Image: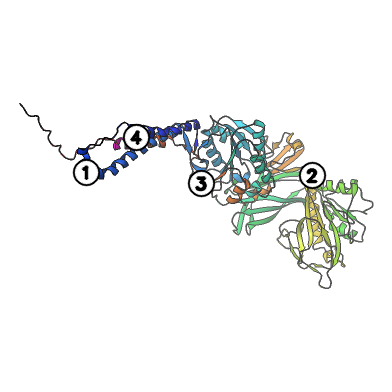
Amino acid sequence: MTFLQPLILWGLPLLLLPVIIHLINRMRHRPRQWAAMQFLLAATRHSTSHARLRNLLILLMRILAVLTLLLFLARPLIGGWLGWALAAAPDAILLLIDRSASMESSIAGADESRREYALKMLADAAGEFEHASHLVLLDSATRQAREITTAASLPRLPDTRATDTAADLPAMLQTALDWLIENEAGTAEIWIASDLQASNWQPNDPRWEALVTAFDSLPQKVRVRLLATTQKSPGNASISVAQLSRQQGTGGGEVRLAVDLNRREAIAGTATITRTLNGVATELEARVTGQSTRWRHRIAVGDQAGGWGKLELSADGNPRDNVTYYRYSDDHPPAALVVTGSALSPLWQAAASVAGQSGRTPARRHAPVDVTPADLRNATLVVWQAPLPEGEMANALQRFADEGGRVIFFPPGQPGTARFTGLGWGEKQTGGDAGFAVGRWDEDQGPLANTDEGLLLPLAKLGVRQRQQVIGQAAVLAAFDDGQALLVRRSLGQGEVYFCATLPLLAWSEMGDGLVVVPMLQRLLAAGSRRLQRDSVAECGQVGAGDLQLEWTSAETGQRGDVQTQAGVYQSGDRWLVVNRPAAENEPGQVEDGAVAGLFGTLPFQLFQAQRDDTALQGEIWRLFLFMMLLALLVEAWLIRPSLMTEDAPPRPQPAVA
């Protein structure tokens, strides 16, 4: 319970007035002993307890009347998640609004999203405080704190509209902390509205501990209240383009897409996908086998210089994750650079060759001592089978990967102390007669994924006789039965770096037959082509500062668009920008209630799990206390009424007449 006029509560000592008056009234009548009345006292002694009880009830009703009058004048508020015992209106209320794409999930049985519901509830609650507290809005997309004058305007503000971004709750709380320090606010409350999506809350982030310590060290008191919009939602599916490459063959050019389809329920069947290509829509069907499916699709584009498109699912529980955008271009065809001094040169050059109108063009080859940073200028893939680079060449390769290129290292055969992005080569190991068997690999993504037809690469039958240990921490895409890594990956900027633990030589493995190494290198070659394209690719909320300075026009609507918060394909002059929602927004996992409470440590914290039939977070209840005061006065009046005569009084004797 909170009070809009807490100063009235200083009048609570007035509750003693009825007691004092009662005691003074009793002191007015001093008892006198009268022998003639002793028999009457004995006759009425049995009714004394009833009289005392009535007097006690009269006293309690008078005290209750004064108490309810004071509470009525203090204008109490109560309801839902904002019940705080005897808490005054704070000096500042910071409204932290989660505007991530997941907040656009609709609520089952209601025609509104989680975001709309939260804004309505917060506006109703904050309206009671707008004359006594400073209301400060802080949204997840801009992460800028600004004061608002009226709570009713909250749902209509530009900074509370739907976005395709993700949220960073620790960063939002850090901004709130900075605002409290800079503005030297007094008592403050932080109201958070969120769906508790784990990727947005990041419960394992070390920033949480530092934030709680910083809030505890503030001179003013800070309370946190969380409105968790975790109501049930209708069924939902999401779509996103995981990989895109343009291939040039004898039959013309084609765009190859690897699309991830995720459903909340593991239901097999088909999904209807509307493909838009340069403004022309076509309806397709994709086979879905479970909760997560990778669907591969090819688009014939002939000799088109470039184009854009989108893939869209049918309407479901969240319209924000039903669309994904893409753009293709052939301004710079893929090209590979092979750095090796071994006899494997012809194999590498053929496996990393590029198809063209006149056939395949082998990859360029350089010896380790001859390669220079200038040789990387037009490459999209670097195959390195030599001791790890150092110095200027290592820096050039890191920049190459950071720009979107792909680098794959194969064993040099000898251990070394050099490291590239924290990875290096250990001892060479021999498997004996049995060799090393491949136990697992990622079939859904990466260079060892299944083919477009759903066929597995023959890694299970791959015989490996020798391998070289990979030193360092990285994502393992394939591993042997004993747990040792066969292929690892480390992301670097927009590109990736790979280490493969064996060679396509008969003395090492059977990779030389081409059934594994060729598709692996061809996929890396196509994935790295992004490095040379003028098209920029970004996630909502992560667009670079340089791109934000340009004026972008949506290819879909022809109007100026907000590239920082809205997904789409945008154009500025001869430059293109593809913006999609962050991949983390497709992850449905939520933080448990107990884990959320633990994040705030010793801070005063209250969690409210929103329900669909909630109509308000709180409201004034002064009418209830006014009714209670009137009721107490009526009961008191009934108790002090005169007693009715139950028997006729004996006639008074008449004086004798002389």
- Mark 1 residue type: Ala
Res 348 → quadrant: bottom right
| Residue type at numbered disc 3 | Gln
Residue in view at x 57 percent, y 29 percent: 149
Q: Is residue 113 above or below residue 364?
A: above
User: Which label's residue is closer to the chain start, 1 or 3?
Assistant: 1
N-term-proximal mark, 4 vs 1: 1
Q: Name the kind of residue labelled 2 in the image.
A: Gln
Residue 589, percent across and down?
62, 52
Q: Nearer the viewer, residue 618 or 260?
A: 618
Q: Does residue 430 show up magenta in the picture? A: no
**Residue type indicated by callout 4:** Leu
Which stretch is magenta? 633-639
Q: First in sequence: mark 2 or mark 3? A: 2
Q: Secondary structure at mark 3?
A: loop
Which mark, by number, is residue 595? none
Q: Is residue 397 left or right of residue 38?
A: right
Mark 2 or 4, nearer chain start: 2
Task: Please tell me whether mark 1 sits on a helix, a strand or a loop.
Answer: helix
* Labelled disc at residue 611: 3
For marks 3 and 4, the one nearer the N-term is 3
Residue 537 placed where, x, y %? Answer: 74, 44
Q: Which residue is mark 2?
A: 533
Label 2: element kind: loop
- Contact (CB < 8 A) between labels 2 and 1? no
Q: Nearer the viewer, residue 21 or 506?
A: 21
- Expressed as whole percent of the image width and height from the top left, the position of residue 238 reads 63, 50
Mark 4 neighbour density, 10 Å: few (under 14) some (14–19) many (20 or more):
some
Residue under pointer 4: 633
Q: CA distance from mark 2 to mark 4?
A: 83 Å
Mark on residue 43?
A: 1
Whether residue 250 is visible, yes or no, is no
